[in-house]
Each structure stands twice: as structure tokens, then as C-alpha cells.
Amino acid sequence: MLHFRRSARVDVPGVSLTVEAPAGDSVRHRVRNLSEGGMLVEGLELPVAQDLVLTVDAPELHATARGHVAHRTGRDTGIAVDRWNVPIEDVRALLDPQFDTGELYVAEWA
């Protein structure tokens, strides 16, 4: 199966991921890189195609999401995010500090 990324992944220091487990166990893992559509997580060992409920913590973002394991590479796991539970602009702001999250407006010229 081929996997294609729709957006580039960005190295994000200080970002971690916690996966909700049915038994209530949760371990924090370091996120190596992140994009709007997914992330590469260090040390997370889950089977491909497993559905996930996850929490991403960063200095400027605390977000939950639903996703699934897209691929495994050694000890790293690629996660595809199916749905963020925050506005996508919040994720974009973490990826690009220059991203303007301000509101757009239309001026009417007389």
C-alpha cells in the first residue's frame, strides 16, 4: 500500500503525543515531525491500521484528534490524522510561526 502526504512535515521540538488506551494506561511519546495530516512518533509500537484517539501537547497547542497508524519504520510510527478537534489554523500556527491566525475581513470601497 502506498501512502502520500498532502502537506510537508515539519520538525517540532517540544511536542509530545499521548494515545488513549482502553486500560487507562497512557504513555507520552516524542513527536519527531508534524503536518496537518499526520506525524511521525518516536517509540510508539502499534500495529498498522489501528484506530487511535490521541492528544498532542506543545508549548502553543493542546489538541485532541482521531487517527490511525499509517506505517511503521523501525521504532517510529507514522500516524495519519483523520480529524483534529481544534481549528486547523491552530495546527498551522504551530507548523509555521509566521502563519497569521487573525480574522480576514472585506473592505467595501465607495
Image (cartoon, rainbow, N blue to C red):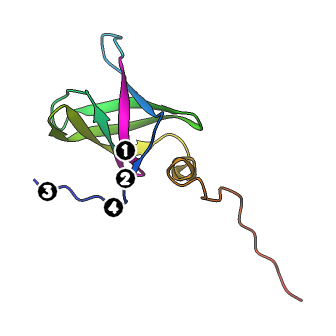
Mark in front: 4 vs 1: 1
Find disc 1 in the rendering and name its residue. 33
Image coords of residue 2 (percent x, y): 13, 56
Marks 2 and 4, how far apart at CA: 10 Å
Find disc 3 in the rendering and name its residue. 2
- Label 4 element class: loop
Q: Name the mark on residue 89.
A: none
Residue type at mark 1 is Asn
- Residue furthest bottom in the image: 110
Q: Earlier in the sequence, mark 4 or mark 1?
A: 4
Q: Name the mark on residue 6.
A: 4
Neighbours of disc 1 within 10 Å: few (<14), some (14-19), many (20+) = some
| Residue 59 position (above or below residue 100) | above
Neighbours of disc 3 within 10 Å: few (<14), some (14-19), many (20+) = few
1 and 2 marks in contact (CB < 8 Å): yes
Q: Nearer the viewer, residue 110 or 29?
A: 29
Find disc 2 in the rendering and name its residue. 9
